[in-house]
Image (cartoon, grey):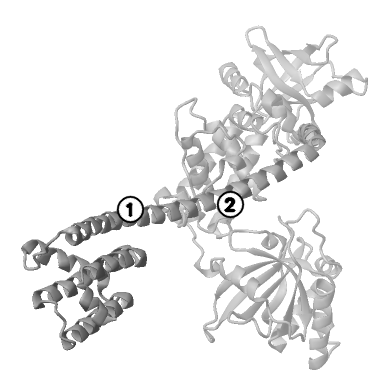
Amino acid sequence: MPSLVAEDWGYKFSGDRTISKFIGQVEGEAALAKYCDWECRDRAEVVMSEIAGKSPSLFYVRRQKVNERFSEEEIWELILATDRDDFKLPELLQKAVKRSYPEGNRTLRLLATVRIEDGIGGLKLLDAGLVALPRGRKDGYALAVQLRLLPKSRSPIPAKSIARVQQMPFWDERHIPTTEQLKVWHTFLNVEKRIAEARQFCVPFRAHNYGSGFKIVTFEIDRNSATLDGYEENPLQVGDFRERLKQARNEDIILFDSPPGSRSSRDGETLGSIAEIEFERGMLRIKLDVDLGDRMAGGRYQLPKQGFLYFEAAGDISQIDRKKKALKMLADGRAQNPYLSEFLFDSSEARIPDKLVKLDRENLLNRNANDDQLAAVEMVLSARDLILIQGPPGTGKTTVIAEICYQIARQGGKTLIASQANLAVDNALSRLVHNPAIRALRKGKAHKVQEEGQPFLEENAIGTWLQNTATDCEQKLSQRQINVTSLQRLLADFDRFNAYSAAERAFFKEQKYLHDGKAEVEEKLTAQSAAYQLSLTAKSEIASLVDGLANLLAAPEINWESSEVSEFMPKLKPYSEGNVLVENFMANVRICVNHTIQNGGRSRPGSLSRDVRSCGVAAGVAAVVGCGESTRVGRQAKSDTPPQSRTENQ
């Protein structure tokens, strides 16, 4: 059981009747006469403090039902736990048992209402008294809580504790099998018991021989004198005795030096188990019990020369009695699984898992488990009631069992492996030999346990676990030493690696800078290339215009009305519009022309018109090729003006 955090719960008695019953059962009815009403309450609190108030005690809390008067309350039962190995009955209860309960021990039981919303007020005790000790054992309805009960305390019940209790099923709603369901089981057990009782026999021996080994003893038996219990009035027929003897093979035989009669088998000496039968010769070989062999070898025990060999199926009968006890607990609703009676008689009633557990392979005992084996383990861990794993031999069922044990152990739980064959149990245990996380314990008689299970017998379990733990620690230490050696080799080159790492970081930083710069340069190159192509196109167009203008100006006579000129002139317009130089030049030319006309210049109107147009052409050339070219063209235009006009213009 995992360790529990101790809690303080407040309580108060709900009435005088509860107080009187509590004091009467613990201190005796005579004690009630010593106290008045208010003194009884104080005394009850003192007694409760002695039992469960000074230090935390383990209680089993069971939900009984919802309070019929107040739906916001539940009725809980608290019983002082008695199934712990370190359980010791409180001193006051020991005195009460000696005084009033000679038939056996008792434990404390409380019945209380609890506010499930907030736990305020703690426990309101409706009943307090003593019950039989078995009531203090855990079952599927009980939640273990480490408690200290405080009187007149405002300590509420913690919300987390209320939530944990409410996860448990109600006791009043427990699943109890019907009489008809149990009838078949009781009938079967009664038949089993009669069969077990029918196996017993008692046969006298006349001599024995065990040589010097103290391991095997051969008895010479009188097969014709076999009886049921050593009484001559209960003889066994030879054939019946033969069958009983065969059925008792490998079972323990008890030795008596006189007829056992009604004596218990504990009054005899356990010899060991029947190893070999030679019935026709009347010879019976017994494999001696180890302890008995040691005692005989040490001279502390000597076999009588004559006596009786007695067998009773005590183990079978004890097992049958345990089964009957289990059925009684099932009928009372005290099974560890509160739903056991539902699916024990009808497996289809087993509850479906709420969710499927998923395991990581690195957390497996056997990381080489195949997908089907892993799925089986996950399903077992997810199942709430019952699971069936079926597979032919060799499919890994034993591997799955070992993995289940390992996974449950990792969660702090326990697993019981049971089988009709010892070999199956021992095989499962053998898969856990080298894992110290599991502290396995093999129950059974040493001579019946296979070699694989021997290390886990009670007398060997501690040594096996210590050896496995030591081996595991040595393996882990060895691996860590290897890791340390590897780290030391790496540390020897640490400075070099550190310098390399720094150089690598600088290299990548510079590489990133160059990569980013390259992208920027490529972008600018693309833009410049596009601009250059546009410049080449414009240059080609301008060269064409310049050539056209040169041809136009070089012509001795220009036909300004020609289509060639009319189509060419608009091409100059984009280079002259908005150009201040051109506009000023043209304005001055017009002024010059006007002055020439006003002064009665001799130029013919057509000539003046041509001069003006020539000036326009010159302006276009200036706009196209620049000021230097414009000056040259302008001078050419002036040279075409008659001298008189130039003088008058000046």
Give x and y (percent) for residue 631.
33, 67
Q: Earlier in the sequence, mark 2 or mark 1?
A: 2
Q: Which residue is mark 1?
A: 533
Give x and y (percent) for residue 505.
66, 47
Relative depth, front residue between 631 and 639:
639
Query: How far, Cα to Cα, is label 2 from label 1?
Result: 30 Å
Give x and y (percent) for residue 243.
57, 20
What residue appears at the point 55 percent right and 51 percent down from the top-left corner?
A: 327
**Residue 193 seen:** yes
Give x and y (percent) for residue 133.
72, 61
Q: Secondary structure at mark 1?
A: helix
Q: Secondary structure at mark 2?
A: helix
What residue appears at the point 24 percent right and 67 percent down from the top-left corner?
A: 639
Q: Amino acid at mark 1?
A: Gln
Query: Looking at this rendering, what residue extends furthest in the right direction?
Result: 299
What residue appears at the point 75 percent right and 70 percent down from the top-left corner?
A: 147
Dot 1 crowding, Cα within 10 Å, few <14, some 14–19, many 20+: few
